[in-house]
Amino acid sequence: MAKVRITFSECEHQGDLNNYADDVRESGGTILEESVNTDIEEGTILVEVEDKQTFVNKLSETDCWDFRI
């Protein structure tokens, strides 16, 4: 298992992060914590995954965009 912190831009409120969190779960991640910084419109999710590369590949195929790992 690996822990991965993902940062999403254009995250203006918790609702935006909730949408990203759905994609994270559908890609095989278990969410450990999440937060939103509305001042800079950035959301962060700490996730645990079986295989980081497989997870990143699956997440890249979702509606998530402009995320950093």
Image (tube, rainbow, N blue to C red):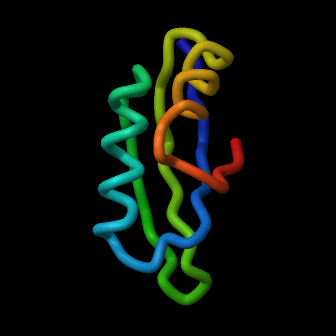
Please identify the residue farthest to the bottom as the structure is shown: 39
* Most foreground residue, 60 or 5: 60
Q: Is 48 left or right of 69, judged from the image as shown?
A: left
* Most foreground residue, 68 or 61: 61
Q: Position of residue 4 (x, y in %)?
A: 60, 33
Is residue 52 placed above or below 22 in the rendered structure?
above
Q: Quadrant of the C terminus?
A: top right
Residue plotted at (57% across, 28% down): 3
Residue plotted at (37% across, 37% down): 31
Residue plotted at (61% across, 55% down): 7
Is residue 27 placed above or below 66 in the rendered structure?
above
Q: Position of residue 59 (x, y in %)?
A: 53, 32
* Most foreground residue, 5 or 61: 61
Q: State the count of labels.
A: 0
Residue plotted at (40% across, 20% down): 28
Q: Position of residue 50 (x, y in %)?
A: 50, 10
Q: Is 51 left or right of 15, judged from the image as shown?
A: right
Is residue 7 placed above or below 32 in the rendered structure?
below
The quadrant in which residue 17 appears is bottom left
Q: Position of residue 24 (x, y in %)?
A: 42, 36
* Most foreground residue, 10 or 47: 10
